[in-house]
Each structure stands twice: as C-alpha cells, then as structure tokens.
Image (cartoon, rainbow, N blue to C red):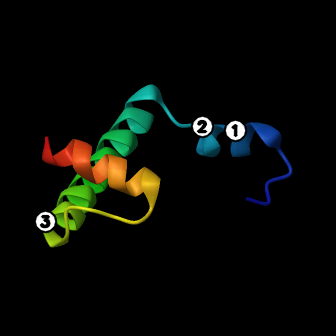
C-alpha cells in the first residue's frame, strides 16, 4: 500500500471475522452453483476428483 507507517497499513489490510465469513459464504455459494450446473450438463467426469463431487451433488 506504500505507507511508511505500518499502523496505517495494518488498519486497512485487516479483515474481520464477519468479512471473512461473508466472503467464504459467497464463494461457497458460487462453488455449489457451478457444481450443480456441471452436474446438469453431464453427470460424470473423467477427472476422478470432479466425478466424485458431481456424483455426490446428484445424491
């Protein structure tokens, strides 16, 4: 951020627990929507990790 005084940078770079939780909730929602959209397109994947996630989403 370019401030010589570290206390200024600390003030503006600090996130609260509420901010963190809101970010995680939003990212989780986007992930779940993307997984559901992928599952709707095709219920299987040749990628083993994605296949497990897609199948778990359909259960």
Nearer the observer: mark 3 or 2; the answer is 3
Dot 3 or dot 2, earlier in sequence: 2
- The N terminus - image quarter: bottom right
Whole-percent x, y for residue 14 in the image: 59, 37
Q: Nearer the viewer, residue 20 or 38?
A: 38
Q: Nearer the viewer, residue 27 or 9?
A: 27
Q: Picture quarter containing residue 7? A: top right
Q: Local crowd at mark 1 within 10 Å, few (<14), some, or many (≥20)? A: few
| Residue at image location 17% in from the left, 72% down from the top | 41
* Disc number placed over residue 49 in the picture, else none: none
**SS label for mark 1:** helix
40 in relation to 56, above or below: below
The residue singled out by tag 3 in the image is 40
Q: Are marks 2 and 1 in contact (CB under 8 Å)?
A: yes
Using the numbered discs, state the Cα–Cα distance from disc 1 to disc 3 in whole angstroms.
45 Å
| Residue at image location 37% in from the left, 33% down from the top | 21
Q: Is residue 43 left or right of residue 12?
A: left
Using the numbered discs, state the Cα–Cα distance from disc 2 to disc 1 in whole angstroms.
6 Å
The residue singled out by tag 1 in the image is 10
Q: Local crowd at mark 2 within 10 Å, few (<14), some, or many (≥20)? A: few
| Residue at image location 71% in from the left, 43% down from the top | 8
The residue singled out by tag 2 in the image is 14
Q: Is residue 51 left or right of residue 10?
A: left
Going by the picture, which residue comes out furthest to the bottom? 41
């Amino acid at each position: 951020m370019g401030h010589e005084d570290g206390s200024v940078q600390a003030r503006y770079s600090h996130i609260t627990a509420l901010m963190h939780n809101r970010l995680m909730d939003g990212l989780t929602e986007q992930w779940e929507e993307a997984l559901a959209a992928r599952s709707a397109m095709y219920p299987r994947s040749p990628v083993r990790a994605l296949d497990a996630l897609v199948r778990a989403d359909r259960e």
